[in-house]
Image (tube, helix red, strand yellow):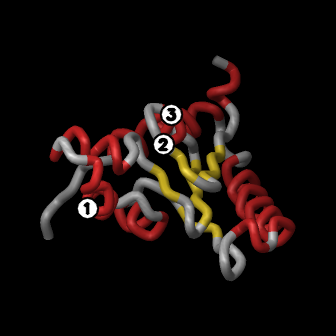
Amino acid sequence: MASLRVPIIVTVTGEGGSGGALALGVGDRVYMLEYAVYSVISPEGCAAILWKDQDKKAEAAEAMKVTAPDLLELGIIDGIIPEPRGGAHRDPEATARSVGDTVAKALAELEKRTPEQLLEGRYRKFRSLGVFTEG
């Protein structure tokens, strides 16, 4: 239980999926690399369930909103970490610096919180997922 009382910062660097995506979602901060994807099921799996046709994976991916910009807009993630032109693999050192800078900034902010504040923030954040209001 002690590990839950320290800041948890998650960074999705490529493809975050399956049931593990749910566990990642309870971090104090969740970031994604610009071209990463993050979902609880693959587009192929979603298409197979909804349409019984894996060939509809592109339609499923669009509906699922798996990209960093989509997830930021929905409030699922807290920020997008820019990647070098062409993707992270083009300049791993620059990518590592960007990830490190983002994590360091978040950690500096989160370390000011008490364990109780961290736990309450996670609870509120996770409970707000999927709640929408029309305005």
* Camera-side mark, 2 or 1: 1
Identify the residue position indicated by label 2 in the image.
Answer: 17
For this orientation, the residue located farthest to the top is: 1
Q: Amino acid at mark 3?
A: Gly
Identify the residue position indicated by label 3 in the image.
Answer: 20
Q: Are marks 1 and 3 in contact (CB under 8 Å)?
A: no
Between 110 and 31, the residue placed more toward the observer is 31
Position of the C terminus by quadrant: bottom left
Residue that appears at 58% across and 69% down:
34
Residue that appears at 77% across and 67% down:
95
| Drawn side of residue 115 relative to residue 19, left or right | right
Q: Secondary structure at mark 3?
A: helix
What is the spatial separation of the Cα atoms under label 3 and label 2, in whole angstroms?
A: 6 Å
Residue that appears at 16% across and 46% down:
51
**Does residue 121 appear in this view?**
no
Q: Amino acid at mark 2?
A: Gly
Residue 25 position in % (x across, y down) = 48, 42
For this orientation, the residue located farthest to the right is: 93
Dot 2 or dot 1, earlier in sequence: 2
Residue that appears at 22% across and 38% down:
49
Residue 69 position in % (x across, y down) = 45, 70
Identify the residue position indicated by label 1 in the image.
Answer: 59
Q: Are marks 3 and 2 in contact (CB under 8 Å)?
A: yes
Answer with the quarter of the image where residue 18 lies: top left
| Drawn side of residue 58 relative to residue 15, left or right | left
Give the vertical position of 38 relative to 21 (above or below). below
